[in-house]
Amino acid sequence: MTSTLFADVRVFDGTGRDPFPAQVLVEGDRITAVADRVAADLRTGARVIDGAGRTLLPGLVDAHAHLGFGSTVEHLSRRRDEPDEERALLVAHAGRVLLDHGITSAYSGGNRLPRTETAARKAFAEGWLPGPRLKAASWEGSAGMVEPGVYDFPGVDGRASDPGSVARFVTDMAELGVDIVKLSLSGESAVVRGTSRIVQFTDEEVAAAAHAAEKHGVWLTAHAHAAESVKTAVRHGVRAVYHCTFADEEALDLLGAARDRLFVAPTPGIVHANLHEAGGEPEPGMEVEATRDAVRAVVPELVARGVRVVPGGDYGFAWNPVGRNLRDLELFVDWFGFTPAQALRAATEYGGQVMGMGDELGLIREGFLADLVLVDGDPLDDVRILQDPRRLTVIMKDGRLHKAAG
Ligand SMILES: [Zn+2]
């Protein structure tokens, strides 16, 4: 069994407590010792990485990743019509880029071709393609269950409620082997102007989705900007609620009451990119500034209610590519008032919990999976340094070194 000793590191263990000097021993895929000095008999034969006082973090987790949307920092594309084979390769490529940027786990926020994610999940887990541990998602089901990749947000008025086809969608996706089924419970003004505040599924449809998800053992994720869409998500047990932008007092309280069973990913990254990097002035109906202002007000309210707010900013588009993911941590600090330690805890301890693996992932602790990132510099002083991959001198997933600079 391969073993690795990280010597002379400053450990940020993921809980948010202050970093402490230690040695960390990894055997196989697990962390087996965290100590001032690991006993000589345990470290015999271990490859030694001299941390030179650098900071060791648990591998970082993105809770709203889009491996299949076509763009990474190395490959920008606005195409939406690539052949399936090319899309599959793009997912594999995005997995490597995520890992290069310290993202060792990704909870997918939806895919254009779900089987590519289930295939990538397997390849990454088996280690023959570099990529994060992955929870694979369905394509994004939207109102009236229009085709995959077609975003039309007609709302619920003027169409018949159709719980049967929503349940069938969840069942079909579960049969493809996804972990997560995504429903766009509200519209999205950045895509179809003026639709973010419009509910897209009836209560009866979401109830049917929840019933099917329970039956088939998959998680539900909701895209939900509108207050009523957030409430519907919480009432029906949706596990990850994205955006929550226009949550009102009632929605906030419902999220707070359900804090032990759900996560919120407010996705500041895409909002920032829509404002500053999409090219040209945002059109009024995109509600970009309103979205930013609302989400900045909502997140501190959620934190005050004890909700686990997690990073993951919809990276995958040409103006918000995969690889930029850790910008969310900077925005958690700048927009939401997190300390760097709180932002890092959200990306590590809560990240492990989002992945459904909170008892073995997300902390530097004996017995936990060895997903580790060694950082040149102090991310607790300036969390932005994590966005520079040259600062991530060692990246390990599952006890295997993906990168070891020098
Ligand atoms: Zn998304």
Image (cartoon, helix red, strand yellow):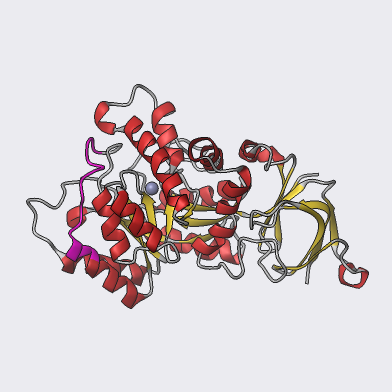
Q: In this rendering, does residue 110 appear at all? A: no
Q: Position of residue 286 (x, y in %)?
A: 28, 32
Quadrant that contains the C terminus? top right
Q: Is residue 173 magenta?
A: no
In the image: residue 93, left or right of residue 35: left
- The segment highlighted magenta reads 192-206
Q: In this rendering, does residue 357 appear at all? A: yes
When asked about the image quadrant of residue 253, the answer is bottom left
The residue sitting at 8% across, 59% down in the picture is 160
Residue lying farthest right?
Answer: 40
Q: Position of residue 143 (x, y in %)?
A: 20, 53
When asked about the image quadrant of residue 233, the answer is bottom left
Q: Is residue 193 above or below residue 230?
A: above
Q: Position of residue 333 (x, y in %)?
A: 55, 39
In the image: residue 242, left or right of residue 2: left
The residue sitting at 34% across, 22% down in the picture is 281
Magenta span main SS: loop
